[in-house]
Amino acid sequence: MHVIVGGVLEKEGKVLLVQEAKKKCYKKWNIPAGHLDCNETLIQGAIREIKEETGYDVELTGILNIANRVIEDDILVTIIFSTKILKETSDYMTDEILDREWYEYDDILKNMDEELRDLNFVKQPIANLKNNKIASIDIVNEL
């Protein structure tokens, strides 16, 4: 099983997407997210992945989406958080991310299907944020 954690960064009615450098999804736009590391909590992992891929320090404020899928006898679980930007920087992992750009909600939801890495993975959390469907961060227990 693999766990993917990440978050949607929002500012002035726009959402930050990152452009992938990986060969299998080269130049596709995505939510900043990645694999949870061993000995890492969901919250720690999401904050780390967001920082690595965007350069931004964030606080997680809620849960936008929890999903799973079976891929070739493996299970992929994704947890995407809403965020509050604490510090903006220009530093991010350029070996994994080609670019980052702010997009309006409706551009992502209506006009970018061909440019997104995974439609449901990207669009559902953004639609949930736009429609204020945010679960409380308090339901995440760090044991």
Image (cartoon, helix red, strand yellow):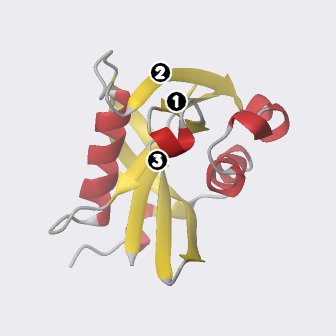
Helix, strand or loop at disc 2? strand
Give the residue pinned by disc 3. Answer: 7
Q: Mark 1–mark 2 contact, CB under 8 Å?
A: yes
- Residue farthest along the front direction in this orientation: 23
In this picture, residue 73 sits left or right of residue 117: left
Residue drawn at (63%, 53%), measured in percent from left and top? 125
Residue 57 occupies which quadrant of the picture? Answer: top left
Q: Quadrant of the N terminus?
A: bottom left
Inspect this view and state whether residue 93 appears: yes
Q: Earlier in the sequence, mark 1 or mark 2?
A: 1
Residue 96 x/y as whole percent? 36, 34
- From mark 3 to mark 1, how far is it between C-alphas? 15 Å
- Residue farthest along the left direction in this orientation: 39
In this picture, residue 2 sits left or right of residue 100: left
Between tags 3 and 1, which lies in front? 1
- From mark 1 to mark 2, how far is it between C-alphas? 5 Å
Question: Is residue 26 depicted above or below 78 in this figure?
Answer: above
Residue 109 x/y as whole percent? 78, 40
Give the residue pinned by disc 2. Answer: 99
Task: Give the label on residue 134, or none.
Answer: none
Mark 2 Cα-neighbour bin, 10 Å: few <14, some 14–19, many ≥20: some
Residue drawn at (42%, 61%), measured in percent from left and top? 4
Q: Mark 3–mark 2 contact, CB under 8 Å?
A: no
Residue 64 occupies which quadrant of the picture? Answer: bottom right
Mark 3 Cα-neighbour bin, 10 Å: few <14, some 14–19, many ≥20: many
Task: Give the label on residue 19, or none.
Answer: 1
Please, what is the three-letter code of the amino acid marked with disc 2?
Asp
- Residue farthest along the right direction in this orientation: 110
Q: Earlier in the sequence, mark 3 or mark 2?
A: 3
Inspect this view and state whether residue 12 appears: no
Q: Quadrant of the C terminus?
A: bottom left
